Each structure stands twice: as C-alpha cells, then as structure tokens.
Image: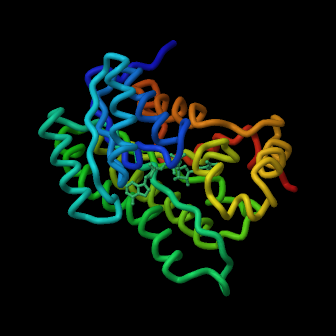
C-alpha cells in the first residue's frame, strides 16, 4: 500500500536543513510532495527553504519557499496567508523546528532557555493557532509535531531546556488532539531517537559531549538498539503515514521513531 496525499497542501515550518544533506524537515517536505501534496516550505533561512522547494519542483511537484521565523506571530500569519493564496487550502501542518542548547539548570544561559521555548514550543502554538481555524472551517486537518524521545527520556546529554521543551510539545499535541478530535482534525507527535542528521553533525554541543565528530557518530550508533542511528527519511515516512487517510483513527499519539531505544531501562 502506498499512502496518497494528492490534492492536499502541506505546510512545513523548518523545511530547510541546517547543513548539507537531509534534515528531518527537508525530508518530510519532499516526502509529502512525493505522496502528492503541494508543499509550503517555510524557514528562517530562505536559501534552505528554496533548496527544499527546488528539489520538490525538480521532481515535478509543486512547492513554494517562504522566509519566516516561526517564533514570531506575524511571520507565521503571513506564511499561512501566502500558502492559502497560493494553494487555496491547508490539510497538513508539520511543525519541525527545534534547537538543542546545552546546559543544566545552573550553567544554562537563560537566553538559550527562552530561545528553546520559543523555537521548540511556542512555534507549535503559533502555527496551530493560525492553521486550526482554517482546518476547522474545512472540517479536516492533520497536525504533526516533531518532538523527540528527549521529551519522555533523559538522553544522557546535559540539555535541560531541550528535555523540558519537548515534554511541553508532547502535552500541547495531546491537548490539541482532544480539543479538535470531533472536528475532523488530528494531532500527533513523532519522537525521533538518535538520528544522523545535519543538526546533530554540526551542533558544537554534541561534538563536545562525545569528544570529536568521529567518536560522536560511533557512540550514537553503538547506543542505538539496531547498531545504527536512524535518518531523516525514517521520520519523514512516519509523517506521511500519519497524514494519510489510512491513519484516520490515530490521534494524540506520541510515536517514537527510535529503533526501540525508548524501550530500554538502561
Ligand atoms: N537529529 C536528531 O537526532 C533528532 C532527534 C530527535 C528530535 N529531533 C528534532 O528534529 C527537528 C529538527 O530536525 P532537522 O533535522 O530538520 O533540523 P535542522 O536543524 O537540520 O533543520 C531545521 C530547520 O529549521 C530552521 N529553523 C530554525 N529555527 C527556525 C525558526 N525560528 N523559524 C523558522 N525556521 C527555523 C533552520 O533554519 C533549519 O533549516 C527538531 O525539532 C529536533 O528537535 C532531531
């Protein structure tokens, strides 16, 4: 069975990638398009948004690139308005943006705490706030939030703000799911585990924790139950399934995409 999203529009916040290769948001945007959806690719980094939209168009699908900061309400409202004027409707909202500041309760820079809450949590609230009225009026919609197993487990890194923000994303997802279930709208969260993406490859905090980049990758592979980290396509394909009509009774779920990592007691 292949899952079709044809004639639908997906809005992906954080649709670029923080480095060369495939990040979770970039892969999700392309996977939605390959399933038939028109895709609005929104990113703080316009070059990254344009790259993703360009890949989609080069494969014969439709996409637009929009520059915007998902933590700023005016930017979110403008991105949603541009998407509606270009594609006419929105069936899928995909909230991907996330940052990973390092630090514990004493040494964490308070500005980093605020940034994590803005980019990881407030982003979900703002995007939902501006897309939900439209979904409600059409009686259909799917929201998929990219959380993390760090929202339900402590991953061994010193990242208080990240753990807290992802736990908040989980509960916000469930709150939306129940409030809108009877209106034809579903909301779920995907909880990636240890993934090999540009975000992890480039963030200085991860390298510092492991010592160097090579050790970082080897240790993350070794911790993964399968012996290998996952990749952005594992997250993207789960998102396509959750957005499909075949997933119509899946609502309020926190879906780990982690090779089984979150089953571990130690
Ligand atoms: N890679 C992993 O191991 C892993 C594990 C668990 C969860 N995640 C989650 O996956 C998501 C990110 O994955 P990715 O691989 O796409 O990351 P990425 O950093 O490669 O891409 C994120 C994109 O979001 C954009 N962005 C950042 N802040 C923004 C803002 N304020 N407004 C608009 N755009 C903004 C960046 O420019 C970038 O293009 C995050 O939510 C992260 O917490 C990743």
Residue 42 versus residue 117: which sits nearer the camera?
42
Residue 47 versus residue 160: which sits nearer the camera?
47
Outermost residue to the top: 1
Left or right: where does residue 265 sit relative to residue 241? Answer: right
Q: How is the image coloured?
A: rainbow
Left or right: where does residue 119 sit relative to residue 204? Answer: left
**Residue at 63% from the left image edge and 36% from the top image edge:** 231
Q: Is residue 248 visible?
A: yes
Please state the horizontal and vertical placement of residue 106, each as a whole percent of the image.
Answer: 67, 87
Please state the horizontal and vertical placement of residue 214, each as a whole percent of the image.
Answer: 79, 47
Q: Quadrant of residue 84?
A: top left
Locate the C terminus by quadrant.
bottom right
Q: Is residue 164 above or below residue 44?
A: below
Residue 137 versus residue 239: which sits nearer the camera?
239
Outermost residue to the left: 85
**Residue at 68% from the left image edge and 37% from the top image edge:** 230
Q: Is residue 263 visible?
A: no
Q: Is residue 110 above or below residue 221?
A: below
**Residue at 15% from the left image edge and 34% from the top image edge:** 88
Residue 171 versus residue 86: which sits nearer the camera?
86
**Residue at 19% from the left image edge and 38% from the top image edge:** 138
Q: Quadrant of residue 225?
A: top right
For the image, the number of numbered tags is 0
Q: Is residue 55 above or below residue 265?
A: above
Please state the horizontal and vertical placement of residue 265, each as a whole percent of the image.
Answer: 85, 55
Please state the horizontal and vertical placement of residue 170, each as a whole percent of the image.
Answer: 52, 58
């Amino acid at each position: 069975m292949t899952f079709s999203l044809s004639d639908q529009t997906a809005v992906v916040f954080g649709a670029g990638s923080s480095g060369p290769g495939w990040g979770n948001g970039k892969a999700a945007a392309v996977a939605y398009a390959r399933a038939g959806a028109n895709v609005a690719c929104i990113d703080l980094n316009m070059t990254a948004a344009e790259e993703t939209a360009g890949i989609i168009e080069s494969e014969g699908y439709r996409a637009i690139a929009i520059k915007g900061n998902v933590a700023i309400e005016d930017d979110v409202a403008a991105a949603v308005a541009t998407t509606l004027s270009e594609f006419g409707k929105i069936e899928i909202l995909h909230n991907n943006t996330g940052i990973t500041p390092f630090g514990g309760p004493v040494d964490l820079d308070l500005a980093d705490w605020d940034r994590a809450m803005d980019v990881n949590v407030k982003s979900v609230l703002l995007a939902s706030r501006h897309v939900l009225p439209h979904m409600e009026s059409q009686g259909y919609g799917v929201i998929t939030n990219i959380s993390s197993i760090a929202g339900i487990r402590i991953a061994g890194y010193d990242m208080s703000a990240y753990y807290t923000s992802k736990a908040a994303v989980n509960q916000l997802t469930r709150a939306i799911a129940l409030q809108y279930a009877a209106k034809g709208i579903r909301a779920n969260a995907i909880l990636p585990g240890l993934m090999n993406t540009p975000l992890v490859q480039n963030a200085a905090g991860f390298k510092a924790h492991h010592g160097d980049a090579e050790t970082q990758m080897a240790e993350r592979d070794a911790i993964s139950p399968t012996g290998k980290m996952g990749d952005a396509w594992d997250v993207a394909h789960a998102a396509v399934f959750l957005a499909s009509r075949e997933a119509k009774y899946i609502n309020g779920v926190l879906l780990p995409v982690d090779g089984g990592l979150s089953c571990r007691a130690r």
